[in-house]
Image (spheres, rainbow, N blue to C red):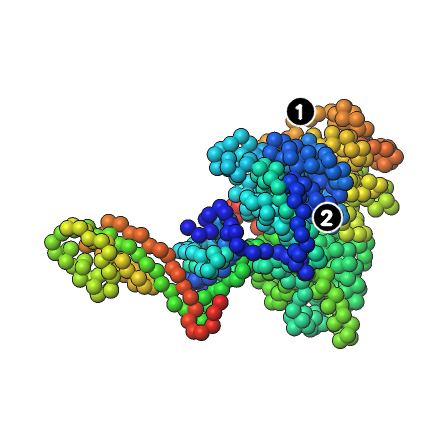
Amino acid sequence: MSAASEDIARHTMSVIVDNEAGVLARVIGLFSGRGYNIESLTVAEISDDNTVSRITVVTSGTPMVIDQITAQLERLVPVRAVRDLTVEGPSVEREMALVKVRGTGDIRVEALRIADIFRARVVDTSTESFIFEITGPTEKIEAFISLMQPLGLVEISRTGVAAIARGAEAL
Amino acid sequence: MTSLKSVAPKDAGPRLVGRSGMTAKPEIMSGAEVIIRALEDMGVDTIFGYPGGAVLPIYDALFQHSKINHVLVRHEQGAAHAAEGYARSTGKPGVVLVTSGPGATNTVTGIADAMLDSIPMVVLTGQVATHLVGTDAFQEADTVGITRHCTKHNYFVDKSEDLCQIMFEAFHIATTGRPGPVVIDLPKNIQVADAPYVKPIGQVEHRTYKPQIKGDRALIEEALELMAEAERPILYTGGGIINAGPAASQLLREFAHATGFPVTSTLMGLGAMPHDDQQFLGMLGMHGTYEANMSMHGCDVMVCLGARFDDRVTGRVDGFSPGSKKIHVDIDRSSINKNIHVDIGIVGDVGHVLEDMLKLWRAKAYRARPQVKDWWAQIEDWRARDCLAYAQKGEGILPQHAVKRLFDLTHHKSPIITTEVGQHQMWAAQYFGFDKPNKWLTSGGLGTMGYGLPAAIGAQLAYPDALVIDIAGEASIQMNLQEMGTATQYRLPVKVFTLNNEYMGMVRQWQQLTYEGRYSSSYSDSLPDFVKLAESFGWTGIRIEKASDLDDGIKQMMETDGPVFVDCVVEKLENCYPMVPSGAAHNEMILGPEGASGKISKEGQALV
């Protein structure tokens, strides 16, 4: 159905969960078991007493599928709240990547120059390599990676997206 | 890494407390005793189980506390289905106790079945001691991992002090909201260690799990306005009405009569509306009645009450009731807009919502529009097709006739009917009428062959004096035949009425209708002599082979004390009609053999 595929959009969701055993497996398994897409997923404890975790999932689907994902997540017993940051107003999304580039001579200099433009930091170096740390929205990370490709890119580690709604309101 | 760790934080605080809190001073006892005490304090009188190494402490505690009736099954799948039968017939949770490894994995089919049919169930599984978990110890299986996606929720108890709370929490989750199965995995060392026990006072409340019971008032008002404007309305009801308790069925009847709207029901909802009510159109869906499916297709306002637009109900989704406004009442928000887009979705317990709807309909003095009369005239035209008619000729027994006679001769006893899965199940749904809820126990969502006999055992235990009949097929019944021994042991007078056509009939029917009659592996070869088999278990066996013997055979079954196995030999090649072929819409039903082509499109084949 081509009409439906045109409606497919990327959504970033925040899922606040009780930090109990297996809760991440429940969330991931829900996506795989029901055939939903996970583009990125991050998770960490967010409360002082280690009882609450925040999972950020980037997924894609038609509005009906996204609504279904929200409902299915809410149905999980340890889930406290689910927010679709994409539909609930403006939000900030950030991702961090470590990018290893190997090379000498001109390409090494060029890599460093581009890194500077992107405000990527050098966190490790050898005479023939750099590891850059870059933070930003997904598009920025991807632009940086594609520029590094011809400049000796050999390895990437990305955190996935962390996101939060703009403004004074808290989840 | 957070959330991946296997130990929940110690200072998490109570997830669940009684209204007045868990303030009493805890008693210290063994974990196994905590389990049994909790079951007793929650009013559990019957559990279904099978012992093994990893649950010996619990079985020992059971031995010393005789208040709970433990029913020893012959296979753990039987325990799970028996618990389902118990739950479905009583409305109370079914409880299962099995050992680790194979004991737990054998219950998985029953757990998945309870999940899809929203049956409240708590399954206690033994587990190897916590220090052995992950070592591939003897009879170790990752039960929590295996059951994660076929349970409403599951627990691994790794600290004795959590045990009591988890027991009460599990029952709370299994029985409230949309009911479902909950697994508690119990390592052996936890069963042995000292553990505190406190009975929570008052109603339990959970920190994150709070099902919505009351429907949104504004949405209910909007829905009623739509209904009052309807010219071609229909109420489409499901298993949610049964789960909402007998009062919900009563409210449905009152609401149907107040509005004058026609009512159809899913397989799971049969009994909510009396079968002989003039407003009842019978079951809808793949093997539903012509009048029910045509009404669903042609309606202008559809009110879905506690049903979930299953693919067996909708047929081809883009051809499903194309011209109607749809209202959906469901306690599970994820059921709304899952398969079919609806105009008004009301989250809430269908009993509560029906109560509000009925009050409002009366308070606002709504009347169905005069056009509803014309709608009824149209429905009566469809009804006049008499889509369930059959012609019993000669001595070969038509399966439809067998079920019809079984109904005629037993319905005065208001029997509880269970089924296996296949043609016989559909014939039972079509030809056996129900006046009350909780009398019809069938595996609807998962379609589990082998469900009927253990479910009948569970129902018979709950109602020792009731007439409980498993309408079976000769293929399905063999899947849990071993449970005949359970019925014998507990002197349960269940009746198994098997329609024996020597085929996996529904498979054979599909092969005839969609694979040009290539009957691949659907013949029931090497059948046992069911009469002798029955007798070997201490049952009475009856074989019926001729139409003229049918009534006498059924009467003999009824008059025989104790369990009876009836092997009713029926016409081998009879098909189940009417039928919405796969990939078709409701208005494209096949009413009989003349409509069947023997072929189907690739798309249709893929839809199953």
Q: Extreme front residue here?
A: B25
Question: Is B318 in front, or is B338?
Answer: B338
Question: Is B461 in front, or is B272?
Answer: B461
Marked residue chain, label 2: B
Q: Which residue is rendered at x = 65% and y = 27% of the image? A: B525
Number of marks drawn: 2
Q: Which residue is rendered at x = 73% and y = 35% of the image? A: B64
Residue A56 picture quarter: bottom left
| Circle 2 residue | B41
Q: Which residue is rendered at x = 79% and y = 48% of the image? A: B433
| Circle 1 residue | B526
List x then y, in percent, for residue B350.
Answer: 70, 61
Q: In this view, does B212 lie above or below B532?
A: below
List x then y, in percent, for residue B521.
Answer: 59, 31
Task: Identify the image quadrant of the C terminus of chain B.
Answer: top right
Q: Which residue is rendered at x = 67% and y = 52% of the image? A: B25
Q: Is disc 2 placed on a helix, strand or loop? A: helix
Q: In this view, does B261 lie above or below A25?
A: below
Mark 2 or mark 1, earlier in chain: 2
Q: Is residue B282 above or below residue B490?
A: below
Same subunit: marks 2 and 1: yes
